[in-house]
Amino acid sequence: PVIISMVFMANGLSLVTSPSTDAVMGSLPVDKAGVGSAVNDISREVGGTLGVAVVGSVFVSLWTPAITSKFEAIPGLVKALPDGVFDMARESVGAAYAVVGRSPAPAQPVVQKAVSDAFMSGFGNATLVAAGMALFGAVCAWLFLPARPKDADN
C-alpha cells in the first residue's frame, strides 16, 4: 500500500510539473519571464515544504494515539519495557519498531503487527490529506491560471 501511494503521488507530480510551469510562464509577457520563473520556483519550494509539514503533522497526530492504544491493549507490554522505551516508541516509527526486539519473545509478532497497523493508519490518512491538498491545488489552478496572456484588446 505504501509503494502504491508513492507511485500515484510521483506520477501526479510528474504529470503536473511541466504543465503548471507552462501555465505560469505562458501567462506572462516575455520581459517578465525571469520574475515569473523565480516566483514559480519559490512557490513550488514553499508549497513542497508546507505540504511535508502539514502531512507530517497529520501523520504524527494520528500515529501517537494509535500506537499508544495498540501498545496498551497488549497485556503486560508497557510494564515489560524498560523505562522510557514506551515514550520513545510514541515519538517515532523507528523507535516503535525497535520496541519489537525489546518485547518479550511471545509478544513480538503482536507488537510488530501493532506498529505496522498504527503506521498504516497514520500514513493512509496522511495520504488522504495530501490528495485533498492536491485536489484543492488543481481546482485553484483550473480556475485562476490562464494558459496565455490576455490580449490588450480584451
Image (tube, rainbow, N blue to C red):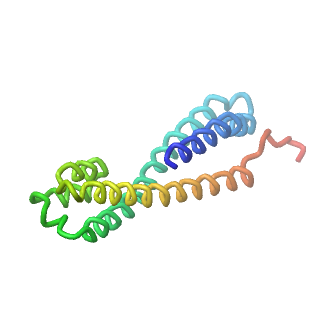
**Which picture quadrant has residue 110?**
bottom left
Task: Between residue 101 and residue 4, name the one nearer to us.
Answer: 101
Residue 114, image x and y in percent?
33, 60
106 displayed left or right of 130: left
Residue 64, image x and y in percent?
32, 63
Residue that lies at the very extreme toward the front in this rendered image: 106
Residue that lies at the very extreme toward the right in this rendered image: 153
**Which picture quadrant has residue 136?**
bottom right
Task: Between residue 114 and residue 40, name the one nearer to us.
Answer: 114
147 displayed left or right of 89: right
Q: Residue at x 54, y 54 (%)?
A: 130
92 displayed left or right of 102: right
Q: Residue at x 23, y 48 (%)?
A: 98
Residue 134, image x and y in percent?
60, 52
Q: Residue at x 49, y 50 (%)?
A: 51
**Looking at the image, how many numbered discs can be counted on the residues?**
0
Q: Is residue 72 above or below residue 7?
A: below
Q: Is residue 99 above or below residue 43?
A: below
16 displayed left or right of 121: right
Q: Is residue 69 above or below residue 100?
A: below
Task: Between residue 65 and residue 145, name the one nearer to us.
Answer: 65
Task: Between residue 24 and residue 66, name the one nearer to us.
Answer: 66
Q: Is residue 39 above or below residue 31?
A: below
Q: Residue at x 39, y 63 (%)?
A: 62
**Which picture quadrant has residue 63?**
bottom left
